[in-house]
Amino acid sequence: MGQTEKVNSYISLFKATMLSQILTHDLRWLAVDKVSSSLFFNQKDCRYIRVMALPVSNSGKKLIQIDVSSDTVCPWCFVGKRNMDKAIAASKDRFDFEIRWHPFFLEPSAPKEGVNKLQFYREKFGSQADGIHAQMAEIFRGFGLEYSMAGLTGNTLDSHRLLYFAGQHDLDKQHNLTEELFLGYFTQAKYIGDREFLLECARKVGLEGAADFLEDPNNGVKEVNEELQKYSANLTGVPYYVINGRYKLSGGRPTEVFQSAFEAAAK
């Protein structure tokens, strides 16, 4: 057998082996790269990724789809978003991104009328409250922001209703709306349940129809609860990220962790 025939024979054998592994249920994993398992949850050995076709955007770049479970009064969710945004900005020459935000309730029974934020967290965290505040203040200063414990905290349902509404119209506006909600609550002493604040955020991102949508308290409630069950029901904390349906990250991870996850998810 000549050299060309040998090569073609090896190629045919490799394709047959690949097809067999894809079609059988006992071995669906192929080793393709070595990725630190410390970057990911829910995978015993991250050297293996499932064989599947990656989505491609209209630009021809590989598409990175990110599902984020988050609450609008979660400071680590804001930290994670800022770090994720930096990673996205550094990766846009290679990938396009599609980000969807999903609801989570840190305090499902929080009052709608709102309570003093500082007092609430001191009652919740006790002697640790001041240390947590100092830690978050230092992290926010790294973003050029002043972390504020002033104002009220409370029920976040209306903010999630608004985010759902935004996501039905424009995912970029939903992403930008998340930023405005975080900025207002954490740095401007805005109350997350205040209707005027929510509408102000909607106006800033160019989201039309928000006032009419929020006017009916039933609008979006069913859908928010459905998303909660689908994406966040088994979570014990947020933020939580699912990248291309495969890789899972939790917490306010550094920018480089997100970049590594994008690279791994694109293979």
Image (cartoon, helix red, strand yellow):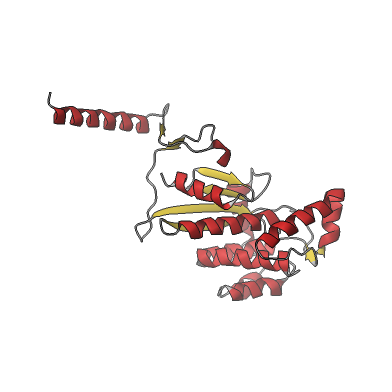
Q: Residue at x 20, y 30 (%)?
A: 7
Q: Residue at x 58, y 45 (%)?
A: 249
If the image is split into quadrants, where does the C terminus sit?
top left
Residue 259 position in % (x across, y down)? 51, 50
Q: Residue at x 40, y 55 (%)?
A: 94
Depth check: 150 or 70 in front? 150
- Residue 139 sits in quarter: bottom right
**Is residue 150 toward the left or the right of residue 243 in the image?**
right
Residue 154 position in % (x across, y down)? 77, 61
Q: Residue at x 23, y 28 (%)?
A: 10
Does residue 40 appear anywhere in the picture?
no
Residue 76 position in % (x across, y down)? 68, 54
If the image is split into quadrants, where does the N terminus sit?
top left
Residue 231 position in % (x across, y down)? 58, 49
**Is residue 165 toward the left or the right of residue 34 in the image?**
right
| Residue at the top extreme, as displayed | 1
Q: Check the image and report above or below for 243 versus 110.
A: above
Depth check: 75 or 256 in front? 256
Depth check: 151 or 6 in front? 6
Does residue 7 appear anywhere in the picture?
yes
Q: How many marks?
A: 0
Q: Check the image and report above or below for 238 versus 29.
A: below
